[in-house]
Image (cartoon, grey):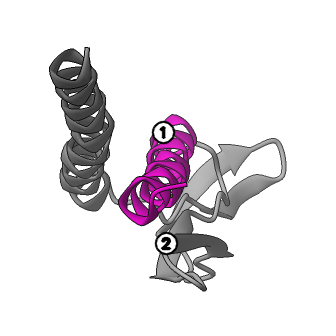
Amino acid sequence: MISGIQAALTALKAYSAKLQNNGNNIANMDTDGFKKGRVLLSEAKPQGVAAKFDKVNTSGPVIYETTVEGMKPVEQSNVDISEEIPDLMMNTHIFKANLKMFQTEDEMVESLLDLKA
């Protein structure tokens, strides 16, 4: 496989994981005690990008809820929507840029075949 295509493919997989993580964090932001996840990117050998999932174990805000036993502290989710939405937008743009690599490669191969024919 062409090295540039391989790198773009691994980047698509990595940013797909980041987008899925953003969606999961946003979907669970109102779940008591939920710990957000994050995807860390690193260089893959021999080329490309590798994604590693990690949990963020910082505590969320604590609120008091009324139960039959009285007031009880409940830890909320540690997801901050003001971090997730910009991260989601950035990850979407990077995913689209890597997808554009495949479209450009397809157009180049088509042009090359037209010249050869």
Question: In the image, what residue occupies the spot 63% across and 81% down?
Answer: 57
Q: Quadrant of residue 70?
A: bottom right
Taking the magenta stretch, the answer to whether it contains residue 7 is yes
What is the magenta range?
1-30
Does residue 31 sit above or below 87 in this rendering? above
Does residue 45 sit above or below 40 in this rendering? below
Residue 54 position within the rendered picture, expressed as x and y whole percent measured from the top left: 64, 76
Circle 2: is it few (<14), some (14-19), or many (20+) Cα within 10 Å?
many
Q: Quadrant of residue 56?
A: bottom right
Q: Are marks 1 and 2 in contact (CB under 8 Å)?
A: no
Left or right: where 29 falls relative to 85: right
**Which quadrant, please, contains the N terminus?**
bottom right
- State the residue in front, 8 or 67: 8
Circle 1: is it few (<14), some (14-19), or many (20+) Cα within 10 Å?
some
Can you name the residue that lies furthest to the front here? 117
- State the residue in front, 111 or 115: 115
Q: What SS does tag 2 mark?
A: strand
Amino acid bearing label 1 = Gly
Q: Which residue is mark 2?
A: 49
Residue 95 position within the rendered picture, expressed as x and y whole percent measured from the top left: 31, 45
Q: Which mark is residue 23?
A: 1
Question: In the image, what residue occupies the spot 56% across and 79% down?
Answer: 59
Instruction: Give the dominant element type of the magenta stretch: helix, strand or loop.
Output: helix
Can you name the residue that lies furthest to the right here? 69
Taking the magenta stretch, the answer to whether it contains residue 110 is no
- State the residue in front, 82 or 51: 51
Q: Earlier in the sequence, mark 1 or mark 2?
A: 1
Nearest-to-viewer mark from 1 and 2: 2
Q: Which mark is residue 40?
A: none
